[in-house]
Image: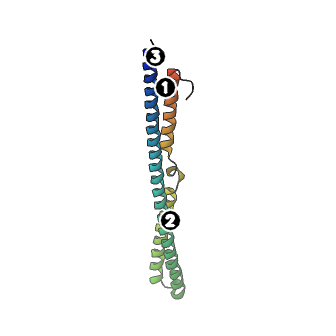
Amino acid sequence: MAGGTERATEGTASLLSEVASGLGRLVKGELMLAKAEAVEGAKAAVGGLIKIAVAAILALVGLNVLAGAAVAALAEAGLGPAWSAVIVGLVLVGVAVGLALAGKAALRPQGLWPDRAVRGLRRDAEAVRGAMSEKGVRHV
């Protein structure tokens, strides 16, 4: 009878070792997913910042053209070159506004937090708790 008890103890120890190893791999995988999500979010943030920078440059150019148009309009009271400068300036400012809004949208915090990894870790923890409660294990 003592041999059966030893085999059961060895089997239990082996099973617990496999569970611990599996949990380690699971946590490692979830951490890798979290890292990948964080990198993805950072890339989106960098893209948003670049768009905002380009928008700022275009806005400055647009304001410069509009200022030149205003000067030309006041100097000439005619409709020729000043109005064309106004049209170009307004188009550049419109593009700058569009880029600024796109950059702002890319900077939303939802892409910076690893939501999928956190949900996966919670789901895994619940599965482990459920499996352990089914087997009668009270503490981990």
Which of label 1 and label 2 is nearer to you? 1
Q: Nearer the viewer, residue 38 or 14?
A: 14
Residue 92 in sight here: yes
- Give the distance between the C-alpha atoms of the residues marked 3 and 1, in whole angstroms: 24 Å
> What residue is disc 2 on?
52
Q: Coloring scheme of the render?
A: rainbow
The residue positioned 43% from the left and 16% from the top of the image is: 3
Q: Residue furthest top?
A: 1
Q: Nearer the viewer, residue 28 or 117?
A: 28
The residue positioned 47% from the left and 49% from the top of the image is: 35
Q: Nearer the viewer, residue 34 or 1?
A: 1
> What residue is disc 3 on?
5
Please tell me which of labels 3 and 2 falls first in the chain: 3
Q: Is residue 74 above or below residue 129?
A: below
Q: Quadrant of the N terminus?
A: top left
Q: Residue furthest right?
A: 139
> What residue is disc 1 on?
131
- Give the distance between the C-alpha atoms of the residues marked 3 and 2, in whole angstroms: 70 Å
The residue positioned 53% from the left and 80% from the top of the image is: 67
Neighbours of disc 1 within 10 Å: few (<14), some (14-19), many (20+): few
- Give the distance between the C-alpha atoms of the residues marked 1 and 2, in whole angstroms: 50 Å
Q: Is residue 126 above or below residue 80?
A: above
- Amino acid type at circle 3 is Thr
- Amino acid type at circle 2 is Ile
Q: Nearer the viewer, residue 53 or 78?
A: 53
Q: Is residue 113 above or below residue 59?
A: above
- Tell me if label 1 and label 2 are in contact, CB under 8 Å: no
Residue 79 in sight here: no
- Amino acid type at circle 1 is Ala
Please tell me which of labels 3 and 1 falls first in the chain: 3
- Tell me if label 3 and label 2 are in contact, CB under 8 Å: no
Q: Is residue 4 above or below residue 26?
A: above
